[in-house]
Amino acid sequence: MSYAVIKTGGKQYKVKAGEILKVEKLHELKPSSTVNFDEVLAYGDDSKIEIGTPLISGAKVEANLIKNSKNRTVLIFKKRRRKNSRRKNGHRQEYSLIRINKIFSKDGKLLSEAEKLKKINEKKEIKKSTQEKK
């Protein structure tokens, strides 16, 4: 099974094809659009690995954006005892949910590809069978 280490949002992620990942928000993108990650730090499989210095030029990871959303609220409460001073604040971090589709090597060769979503195909087959019955 091939994997890659990508950098996005100031963090590094080890990804495999078909994996669903929660990353820092990718701005100005609509759901179901394609995202390319060109900052690949390493890629490989069980037998061989390629490590960049610091990046591997030409390697890329292709993903689909599922949705942009916000995490649950994190409450920040500060209190100074005996001074009647307190402050309550909340924060909701934005994130993007992505699905990794393809991993390409530095020479453009396809290392691994995710399977197609089966649910979509099943829904289409159900619709066709109900239309044929009518």
Image (cartoon, helix red, strand yellow):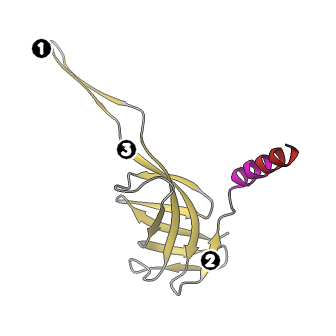
| Quadrant holding the C terminus | top right
Identity of the residue drawn at 38% across and 31% down: 73
Judging by the rendered image, the residue that carries numbered circle 2 is 111
Of helix, strand and loop, which one carries label 1? loop
Judging by the rendered image, the residue that carries numbered circle 3 is 94
Quadrant hosting residue 103: bottom right
> In this view, which residue lies farthest toward the bottom?
107
Q: Nearer the viewer, mark 3 or mark 1?
A: 3
Q: Does residue 125 show up magenta in the picture? A: yes
Of helix, strand and loop, which one carries label 3? strand
- Looking at the image, residue 15 lies above or below residue 90: below
The secondary structure making up most of the magenta span is helix
Identity of the residue drawn at 76% across and 50% down: 122
Amino acid marked by disc 2: Leu
Q: Position of residue 94 (x, y in %)?
A: 37, 44
Judging by the rendered image, the residue that carries numbered circle 1 is 83
Amino acid marked by disc 1: Lys
- Looking at the image, residue 109 lies above or below residue 21: below
> In this view, which residue lies farthest toward the front?
134
Quadrant hosting residue 4: bottom right
C-alpha separation, residue under disc 1 versus residue under disc 2? 62 Å
Magenta span covers which residues?
117-126
Quadrant hosting residue 45: bottom right
